[in-house]
Image (cartoon, rainbow, N blue to C red):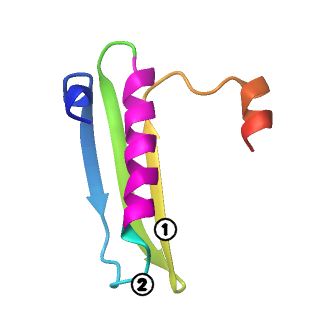
Amino acid sequence: MNESKYKATLIKDFGNIPPTKCRPGPLNQVFMNLLINAAHAIAQHGEIRLKTWQDNGSINITISDTRCGIPEGVQKRIF
């Protein structure tokens, strides 16, 4: 992620979430892959936003960026 700091500003909005049992290694890998992919897709300089919050007993996480997005045809194959 080091090379990405020159292409993107990371904006963190971490809400108050409780300690959670999880497998931190695999989660770390997923988040790093998402952040690296977002940075690679930004042509010049952009923003990557991370937000966490709790709602009705669930922990929510969003990662968004200012890139052009995934073409609709590709989205259908991913989701």
Circle 2: is it few (<14), some (14-19), or many (20+) Cα within 10 Å? Answer: few
At mark 2, the secondary structure is loop
Outermost residue, top side: 44
Please state the extent of the stretch shown in magenta in the rendering: 25-42
Which is more toward the observer, 12 or 24?
A: 24
Q: Magenta stretch containing residue 31, yes or no?
A: yes
Outermost residue, front side: 25
Which mark, by number, is residue 21?
2
Which mark, by number, is residue 60?
1
* Residue 2 image offset from top left, x and y in percent: 20, 33
At mark 1, the secondary structure is strand
Image point 46% across, 24% down: which residue?
67
Image point 32% across, 70% down: which residue?
15
Q: In the picture provided, is 44 more to the left or to the right than 26?
A: left
* Residue 44 image offset from top left, x and y in percent: 32, 13
Against 10, residue 62 (above or below) is: below
* Residue 58 image offset from top left, x and y in percent: 53, 79
Q: Quadrant of residue 35?
A: top left
Q: In the picture provided, is 13 more to the left or to the right than 71?
A: left
Q: Name the kind of residue labelled 2 in the image.
A: Lys
Circle 1 or circle 2, nearest the eye: 2
Against 2, residue 55 (above or below) is: below
**Which is more N-terminal, label 2 or label 1?**
2
